[in-house]
Amino acid sequence: MNLHELIVCRNLLDEEIFNGTANDFQTAARLVERAENLGLSGNLYRTYLIYLLAHEPNLISTSIEMQGGKIGKSLREIFKRDVELLLPILRGEVTSEIKILNDYKPTAEIQNESLNELRRRLDNLKGATEIAYTFIEHYRRFGYGAIAAYRAFHWDADTKNIVGIKHFEPIRLDDLIGYAHQKKLLTGNTTAFVDGKPANNVLLVGARGTGKSSGVKALVNEYYAKGLRLVQITKPQLRDLPEILKTLRQFMSKRFIIFLDDLSFDESEAEYKHLKSAIEGGVESRPENVLIYATSNRRHLIRETWRDRGDDQDELYRDDSANETISLSDRFGLIIHYTAPTQAEYLEIIRSMLKKQGVELDEEKLKLEGLRWEMSHSGRNGRTAQQFVNHYLGQR
């Protein structure tokens, strides 16, 4: 193989494993190191090459992101030519004289859903055209690098970039008991968004502990394979919103929810103006692949005082103050209200959570212990129900 003829995938030549400058034992040492750090198994030449093609940016993967999934015919043909050069490795025909490297078992296989799916699809393919199109489809669905490996990110103000969250909560929509109407509104808007249809920014507002944040997190787990990702930011980071939007504009084949949890402002805080501008009215438009979802216990997000409503203020001032207070929440096209559950709904949440753990309580005991727990804690909501379930299971 003359890999020095690679064009699109020329960055592979930065690896001594593939550029021919390492001897057998240097190559073996590097492959074992990569296998242990990345959780790679099987023929390490093949699996490490698949990892590099899936993870490291190349002209194909970056072009697909920038162009929203599109790729030119000429570039596709050049990529196919590169794949033909790499076929012996991708077919598993290149092996090591150190036999264990041909069927390696790492100490711990790291779970990477998109990479594992790619490997499974490539297992039954032999032709360059099929393999090239499989990689192209992978880039369209999952992206490359961290965008493919992670479902959720946080914003790093120092590096001015998004950073993957390794241990993202694996909650699914089916885990959320009750609030069927709210879930229908949330999933309907998000489905339209990932399908490229018009969709709204969302404000989830209402009682604490009712599952507002969990609902947003569950969306990312449900729609990950369709290209949805989450970027959580803090209130002080609202000043970085122009930079965040600029970064996400580089990944136009993916859809991003910018998530602001438990959001509220005092009137003296200027950050809310950055949010208003980002949602609507800024000089630079918000990218079509980005929506903003926020949760709050306040309907209007900005704290009102009695002074704002006082009769000693002239009419013009009061109108201006009221308009400023409600103008931010009004910019969220979809506002979903969460109310505290009734007693019957609260007990049903507990019953469903226990049932998932294989435990069933009779009605009288469930009511007695569940309500006793509620009275000694923070009220009737989903969070209190989960805390009761944890206590009950822990004391069995």
Image: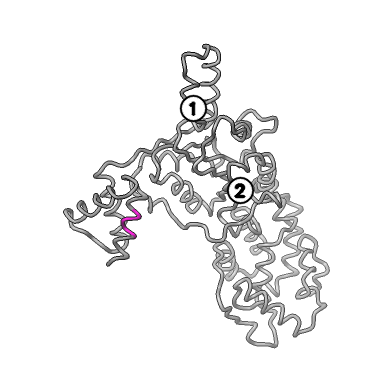
Total marks placed: 2
Q: Which residue is outermost to the left?
A: 364
Residue 353 colored in magenta in the image: no
- Looking at the rendered structure, the secondary structure element under dot 2 is loop
Label of residue 254 in the image: 2
At 70% from the left and 75% from the top, the residue drawn is 88
For the N terminus, the image quarter is bottom right
Which quadrant of the structure image shows residue 163?
A: bottom right
Query: From mark 1 to mark 2, how far is it between C-alphas?
Result: 38 Å
Q: Position of residue 95 (x, y in %)?
A: 68, 82
For the C terminus, the image quarter is bottom left
Q: Is residue 10 above or below residue 195?
A: below
Quick one: 349 or 113, which is closer to the camera?
349
At 69% from the left and 64% from the top, the residue drawn is 53
Quick one: 273 or 203, which is closer to the camera?
273
Task: Tell me if mark 2 has few (under 14), some (14-19) or many (20+) residues whose alpha carbon lies within 10 angstroms of its own.
Answer: many
Kindly report the secondary structure that dominates the magenta region of the rendered protein.
helix
Residue hosting label 1: 304
Q: Is residue 197 above or below residue 162?
A: above
Q: Disc 2 marks which amino acid?
A: Lys
- Looking at the rendered structure, the secondary structure element under dot 1 is loop
The magenta stretch is: 386-390
Q: Position of residue 30 (x, y in %)?
A: 72, 78
At 72% from the left and 55% from the top, the residue drawn is 60
Please tell me which of labels 1 and 2 falls first in the chain: 2
Quick one: 31 or 60, which is closer to the camera?
31
Please give left or right for residue 379 compared with residue 128 in the image. left
Q: Position of residue 77 (x, y in %)?
A: 74, 57
At 61% from the left and 73% from the top, the residue drawn is 40
Task: Tell me if mark 1 has few (under 14), some (14-19) or many (20+) residues whose alpha carbon lies within 10 angstroms of its own.
Answer: some
Q: Disc 1 marks which amino acid?
A: Glu
